Amino acid sequence: MPAARSPDRLPVGTLGDGNKVDLYAGVGTESGGFSVSVGGTGYFYTGGFDDTYLEGNLNAGYGALSAEFSLGTYDTDPESQTYWFLGITLEEGGLYATFGTFGNDFEGEYFEAGYGLSVGDLDLSAAWIYSTEDLLGGDDDNTLVVSVGHTIGIL
Protein backbone atom coordinates (compact mmCIF):
# COMPACT_ATOMS: atom_id res chain seq x y z
CA MET A 1 0.00 0.00 0.00
CA PRO A 2 1.48 3.42 -0.93
CA ALA A 3 2.04 5.99 1.81
CA ALA A 4 -1.16 7.91 2.43
CA ARG A 5 -1.16 11.66 2.31
CA SER A 6 -3.74 14.19 3.38
CA PRO A 7 -5.36 15.67 0.27
CA ASP A 8 -5.79 19.02 2.07
CA ARG A 9 -2.13 19.57 2.85
CA LEU A 10 -1.03 20.49 -0.67
CA PRO A 11 -1.89 23.93 -2.08
CA VAL A 12 -3.52 24.51 -5.44
CA GLY A 13 -0.89 25.35 -8.04
CA THR A 14 2.22 23.94 -9.62
CA LEU A 15 3.59 20.64 -8.30
CA GLY A 16 6.62 19.29 -10.10
CA ASP A 17 5.54 18.67 -13.70
CA GLY A 18 1.84 19.23 -13.04
CA ASN A 19 -0.85 21.12 -11.22
CA LYS A 20 -3.30 20.49 -8.39
CA VAL A 21 -6.89 21.59 -8.89
CA ASP A 22 -9.47 21.48 -6.07
CA LEU A 23 -13.18 21.41 -6.91
CA TYR A 24 -15.74 22.05 -4.16
CA ALA A 25 -19.54 21.92 -4.42
CA GLY A 26 -22.15 21.97 -1.70
CA VAL A 27 -25.41 23.28 -0.34
CA GLY A 28 -26.17 24.45 3.17
CA THR A 29 -28.49 26.42 5.39
CA GLU A 30 -28.36 28.40 8.64
CA SER A 31 -31.02 29.15 11.23
CA GLY A 32 -30.79 30.45 14.79
CA GLY A 33 -27.03 29.99 15.01
CA PHE A 34 -27.15 26.40 13.69
CA SER A 35 -25.71 25.49 10.29
CA VAL A 36 -25.71 22.32 8.23
CA SER A 37 -24.32 21.50 4.80
CA VAL A 38 -23.63 18.60 2.48
CA GLY A 39 -21.24 18.57 -0.44
CA GLY A 40 -18.42 17.01 -2.35
CA THR A 41 -14.74 17.72 -2.92
CA GLY A 42 -12.39 16.55 -5.65
CA TYR A 43 -8.60 16.90 -5.56
CA PHE A 44 -7.18 16.45 -9.07
CA TYR A 45 -3.52 16.32 -10.16
CA THR A 46 -1.94 16.60 -13.58
CA GLY A 47 1.50 15.51 -14.72
CA GLY A 48 1.54 12.28 -12.73
CA PHE A 49 2.24 14.02 -9.40
CA ASP A 50 -0.53 12.18 -7.55
CA ASP A 51 -3.80 10.37 -8.12
CA THR A 52 -7.38 11.63 -7.60
CA TYR A 53 -9.13 12.02 -4.24
CA LEU A 54 -12.97 12.25 -4.18
CA GLU A 55 -14.92 13.03 -1.01
CA GLY A 56 -18.49 13.37 0.22
CA ASN A 57 -18.74 15.89 3.07
CA LEU A 58 -21.22 16.52 5.91
CA ASN A 59 -20.85 19.62 8.09
CA ALA A 60 -22.75 20.94 11.10
CA GLY A 61 -22.12 23.83 13.42
CA TYR A 62 -23.40 26.10 16.13
CA GLY A 63 -21.91 29.54 16.64
CA ALA A 64 -18.10 29.40 16.52
CA LEU A 65 -17.89 25.58 16.70
CA SER A 66 -18.33 23.24 13.73
CA ALA A 67 -17.72 19.60 12.86
CA GLU A 68 -17.00 17.91 9.53
CA PHE A 69 -17.22 14.28 8.50
CA SER A 70 -15.87 13.30 5.08
CA LEU A 71 -15.78 9.91 3.41
CA GLY A 72 -13.36 9.61 0.52
CA THR A 73 -11.63 7.43 -2.02
CA TYR A 74 -8.08 7.68 -3.29
CA ASP A 75 -7.83 6.28 -6.83
CA THR A 76 -4.40 4.72 -7.16
CA ASP A 77 -2.99 1.70 -8.98
CA PRO A 78 -3.63 -1.14 -8.55
CA GLU A 79 -6.65 -0.46 -6.29
CA SER A 80 -8.54 2.38 -4.66
CA GLN A 81 -8.20 3.18 -0.97
CA THR A 82 -10.98 4.52 1.22
CA TYR A 83 -10.64 6.90 4.13
CA TRP A 84 -12.68 9.03 6.47
CA PHE A 85 -11.88 12.36 8.10
CA LEU A 86 -13.43 13.82 11.25
CA GLY A 87 -12.59 17.41 12.06
CA ILE A 88 -13.59 19.95 14.72
CA THR A 89 -13.12 23.67 14.03
CA LEU A 90 -13.28 26.72 16.30
CA GLU A 91 -13.61 30.01 14.38
CA GLU A 92 -14.01 33.60 15.46
CA GLY A 93 -13.52 36.82 13.50
CA GLY A 94 -11.61 35.20 10.65
CA LEU A 95 -9.23 33.27 12.95
CA TYR A 96 -9.70 29.50 13.06
CA ALA A 97 -8.17 26.29 14.35
CA THR A 98 -9.03 22.77 13.18
CA PHE A 99 -8.06 19.42 14.64
CA GLY A 100 -8.79 16.35 12.53
CA THR A 101 -8.14 12.66 12.44
CA PHE A 102 -8.11 10.22 9.52
CA GLY A 103 -9.12 6.57 9.59
CA ASN A 104 -9.56 3.42 7.49
CA ASP A 105 -6.78 3.15 4.84
CA PHE A 106 -5.32 6.51 5.98
CA GLU A 107 -4.30 7.05 9.60
CA GLY A 108 -2.98 10.07 11.40
CA GLU A 109 -3.77 13.49 12.79
CA TYR A 110 -3.99 16.90 11.21
CA PHE A 111 -3.93 20.40 12.76
CA GLU A 112 -4.54 23.66 10.94
CA ALA A 113 -4.59 27.24 12.21
CA GLY A 114 -5.17 30.27 10.05
CA TYR A 115 -6.82 33.55 9.24
CA GLY A 116 -9.09 34.53 6.36
CA LEU A 117 -10.76 37.71 5.18
CA SER A 118 -12.57 39.12 2.17
CA VAL A 119 -11.27 42.13 0.27
CA GLY A 120 -13.71 43.22 -2.40
CA ASP A 121 -14.61 40.09 -4.40
CA LEU A 122 -11.53 38.16 -3.25
CA ASP A 123 -11.21 35.70 -0.38
CA LEU A 124 -7.69 35.81 1.13
CA SER A 125 -6.27 33.35 3.65
CA ALA A 126 -3.09 32.08 5.23
CA ALA A 127 -2.79 28.85 7.23
CA TRP A 128 -0.19 26.73 9.00
CA ILE A 129 -0.87 23.00 8.62
CA TYR A 130 0.75 20.25 10.65
CA SER A 131 0.34 16.56 9.71
CA THR A 132 1.69 13.62 11.72
CA GLU A 133 4.17 11.12 10.35
CA ASP A 134 1.49 8.38 10.38
CA LEU A 135 -0.62 10.35 7.91
CA LEU A 136 2.24 11.13 5.56
CA GLY A 137 4.04 7.79 5.67
CA GLY A 138 7.28 9.47 6.76
CA ASP A 139 8.24 12.46 8.88
CA ASP A 140 5.88 14.97 10.48
CA ASP A 141 5.20 17.88 8.14
CA ASN A 142 4.61 21.62 8.54
CA THR A 143 3.18 23.56 5.62
CA LEU A 144 2.30 27.22 5.11
CA VAL A 145 -0.53 27.78 2.62
CA VAL A 146 -1.48 31.22 1.29
CA SER A 147 -4.52 31.38 -0.98
CA VAL A 148 -6.62 33.75 -3.04
CA GLY A 149 -10.12 32.68 -4.03
CA HIS A 150 -13.38 33.97 -5.47
CA THR A 151 -16.81 32.65 -4.58
CA ILE A 152 -19.32 32.37 -7.39
CA GLY A 153 -22.97 32.50 -6.31
CA ILE A 154 -25.25 30.24 -8.34
CA LEU A 155 -28.63 30.73 -6.64
Image: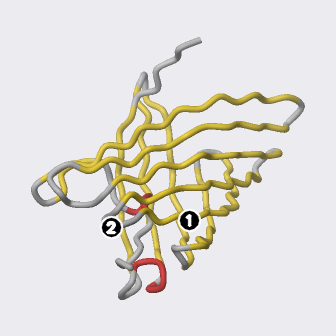
Specify the quadrant that holds the N terminus: bottom left
Q: Residue placed farthest to the top in the image?
A: 155
- Tally the marks: 2
Please, what is the three-letter code of the amino acid marked with disc 2?
Pro
Q: Position of 27 compared to 62: left or right?
A: left
Residue 83 is tagged as 1
Task: Name the image quarter holding the C terminus.
Answer: top right
Which of pointers 1 and 2 lies earlier in the amino acid sequence? 2
How are the colours assigned in the image? secondary structure
Structural distance between the alpha carbons of marks 1 and 2: 17 Å
Answer above or below: position of 97 versus 120.
below
| Residue 120 screen position, x and y as percent | 43, 23
What residue lies at 59% left-to-right and 32% top-to-bottom? 26
* Rendered position, 17 above or below 137: above
Mark 1 or mark 2: which is in front?
2
Residue hosting label 2: 78
Pick the front one: 51 or 20: 51
**Helix, strand or loop under label 2:** loop
Q: Position of residue 40 (x, y in %)?
A: 55, 40
Please tell me which residue is depicted at 55% across the width and 70% down the height of the picture: 111
Residue 27 as seen in the image, left or right of residue 42: right
Q: Are marks 1 and 2 in contact (CB under 8 Å)?
A: no
**Residue at the location (78% across, 37% down)?**
35
Q: Amino acid at mark 1?
A: Tyr
**x and y percentages locating residue 150 in the rendered image:** 41, 28
Going 40% across and 78% down the picture, which residue do you hit? 136
Q: Residues within 10 Å of mark 1 (few under 14, many from 20)?
A: some
- In depth, the one of 75 and 118 nearer the eye is 75
x and y, in percent, of residue 80 in the image: 43, 62
Kindly state the secondary structure of the residue where label 1 is placed.
strand
144 lies left or right of 8: left
